Amino acid sequence: MPKIVNHDEYREELLHKAFGLFARKGYSKVTIREIAKELGVSTGTLYHYFENKDVLFEQMVRLLVREDVKELRLMEVQTRIQSPEKIIEVLFQFIQSKEFYFQSVVLMVCDVYRYNEEGHSLSVLKDCLGIYRNAISQHLDLGNKDLENMLLSIVIGTIFQRMLDPEEIKYCEVSDVLEKLYPFLATGLLFETKKTGIV
């Protein structure tokens, strides 16, 4: 009896496996032939599921982002988070638990920006960045675009800095500072002082 293949599950399996290759070599240097070899499938199989490398990359990134957001929300439910400060703590714990993965994502984004600055793949990454931003905003109930962008920049900056100096930069310390600043950020006090010229 022929084996029944769940094509959606198989497509996701291929996308997960492809991430490792993109993370190691970067977006620009990977070819469909290399992806097929890495995954142990024929190029014909890949083209059956993905029209080209750009389509494969887009589906891979969007799948990973959806899974990240889902996993973060599950962590929040499991820990019965009530305060925004606690959500910040859990956010950084989540990032720390998947540090190599997020560092790989940052490097991959840099590679796409360098070689595909005006291309479709960069547009996809911008969309995914917006998904992360919205997830952080919803769970912290921010309602302030400046604050959303600032927090996302801190998260990305922390990931990047730890690639260069992991001994100096600690997730728990960054989280502690943000937790202490949050009451001022949430009320807009820090942004108001900037507008009025008060330092």
Image (spheres, helix red, strand yellow):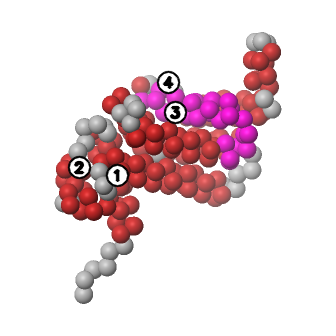
Q: Please provide percent x and percent y for residue 195.
A: 77, 18
> At label 1, which amino acid type do we have?
Leu
Q: Which mark is residue 48?
A: none
Mark 4 against mark 2, which lies toward the viewer? 2
Q: CA distance from mark 3 to mark 2?
A: 29 Å
Q: Which mark is residue 32?
A: 2
Residue 80 relative to residue 40: left or right: right
Q: Which mark is residue 56?
A: 1
Looking at the image, residue 60 lies above or below residue 180: below
Mark 1 against mark 4, which lies toward the viewer? 1
> At label 3, which amino acid type do we have?
Ile
* Quarter of the figure with residue 91: top right
Q: CA distance from mark 1 to mark 4?
A: 37 Å
Element at label 4: loop
Badge 2 vs badge 1, beta-carbon distance below 8 Å? yes
Looking at the image, residue 69 lies above or below residue 152: below
Q: Quadrant of the C terminus?
A: top right
Q: Residue at x 45, y 54 (%)?
A: 63
Q: Please provide percent x and percent y for residue 122.
A: 42, 37
Residue labelled with disc 4: 168
Label 1 neighbour load within 10 Å: few <14, some 14-19, many 20+: many
**Residue 145 inside the magenta-drawn segment:** yes
Badge 1 vs badge 4, beta-carbon distance below 8 Å? no
Mark 3 against mark 2, which lies toward the viewer? 2
**Of the image marks 4 and 3, the number of the one nearer the N terminus:** 3
Give the residues in magenta: 137-163
Label 2 neighbour load within 10 Å: few <14, some 14-19, many 20+: some
